[in-house]
């Protein structure tokens, strides 16, 4: 806390997230405007692999074991690719904005918009029932769906939609984050560098063997997120079918949508966000 980065442009305030490929911090940006210094709230993500890397005692320098340099180098390249994936959608209201990219302390960083309300996971778990009413849940899902629709126009899958990767502003706006697993398919044979991330019942069964672009993969995760938001329970790992018992908290109409979106085989799900929303 209090660490200055990029020649004093940024000050770390406190950590707000810690994932496999990086740490995220709440930070302050200092900007000179008409001769006066103004302060802005931002978030900073630092490339840091907990299982391999460590800091030199008494310094900020990140150490990488010699035998892991090549492997860490590839992972760092994926981290920087994440920045480029997000930047192309910087104007979308439901995709997090990325601002600055820089190297320091033997690692790399990027700065992004700070969303002040925490994750959808936190938001739902703070409620009395650990679930949301249908009207509010559908509003959030439609906002995330609009973000995915924009990505899909560019033949990009997010591949890790889940409550932890959706931030909620204090005004109740949903913002999609964490593009570490996202993959842009320029041709259907370019999936060799795809980073498969399995997130329990939020990931469809095909997640580990995807080799082509398919909106239906993200639609499964979006449906699973809706199921969790409405019930407070983990989505079934094998998906849903019309034969399953409907929870009382879900209306008949939404239940039919979930049973289609969470089908095991992706060709049986809606094939576009627009088709999903129409249901």
Image (cartoon, rainbow, N blue to C red):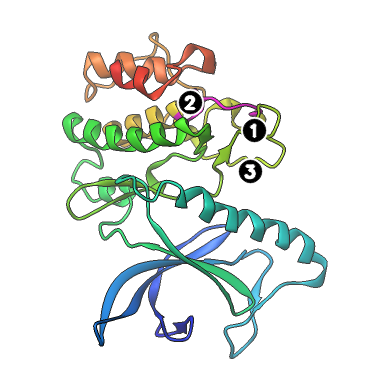
Distance CA(mark 2)–CA(mark 3):
17 Å
Q: How far apart are labels 2 and 1 at the CA level?
A: 16 Å
Which residue is pictured at 30% across the width and 22% down the height?
277
The image quadrant where one finds the C terminus is top left
Mark 2: secondary structure: helix
Q: Secondary structure at mark 3?
A: loop
The answer for how far apart the CA atoms under marks 3 and 1 are is 9 Å
Residue 11 drawn at (x, y percent): 39, 81
Residue at label 2?
A: 215
Q: Residue at x 59, y 67 (%)?
A: 48
Q: Which residue is mark 3?
A: 195
Mark nearest the camera among 3 and 1 is 3
Residue 77 image position (x, y, % from top left): 66, 57
Q: Which residues are magenta?
A: 210-218
Going from the N terminus, do you reach mark 3 or mark 1 first?
Answer: 3
236 vs 37, nearest the viewer: 37
Task: Give neighbour class at mark 2: few <14, some 14-19, many 20+ (Cα, 10 Å).
Answer: many
């Amino acid at each position: 806390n209090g660490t200055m980065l990029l020649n004093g442009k940024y000050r770390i305030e406190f950590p707000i997230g810690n994932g496999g490929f990086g740490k995220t911090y709440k930070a302050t940006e200092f900007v000179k405007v008409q001769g006066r210094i103004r302060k802005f709230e931002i978030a900073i993500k630092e490339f840091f692999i907990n299982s391999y890397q460590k800091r030199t005692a008494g310094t900020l320098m990140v150490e990488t074991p010699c035998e892991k340099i090549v492997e860490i180098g590839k992972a760092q390249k994926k981290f920087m690719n994440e920045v480029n994936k997000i930047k192309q959608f910087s104007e979308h209201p439901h995709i997090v904005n990325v601002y600055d990219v820089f190297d320091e302390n033997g690692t790399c960083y990027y700065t992004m918009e700070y969303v002040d309300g925490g994750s959808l996971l936190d938001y739902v778990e703070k409620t009395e029932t650990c679930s949301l009413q249908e009207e509010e849940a559908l509003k959030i899902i439609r906002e995330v769906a609009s973000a995915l629709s924009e990505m899909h126009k560019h033949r990009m899958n997010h591949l890790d939609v889940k409550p932890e990767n959706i931030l909620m502003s204090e005004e109740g706006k949903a913002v999609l984050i964490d593009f570490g697993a996202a993959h842009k398919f320029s041709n259907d044979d370019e999936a060799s560098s795809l980073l498969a991330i399995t997130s329990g019942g939020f990931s469809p069964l095909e997640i580990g063997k995807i080799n082509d672009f398919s909106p239906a993969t993200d639609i499964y995760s979006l449906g699973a997120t809706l199921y969790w938001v409405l019930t407070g329970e983990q989505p079934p790992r094998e998906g849903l079918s019309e034969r399953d018992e409907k929870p009382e908290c879900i209306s008949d109409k939404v239940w039919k949508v979930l049973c289609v979106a969470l089908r095991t085989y992706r060709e049986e799900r809606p094939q576009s966000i627009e088709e999903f929303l129409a249901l």
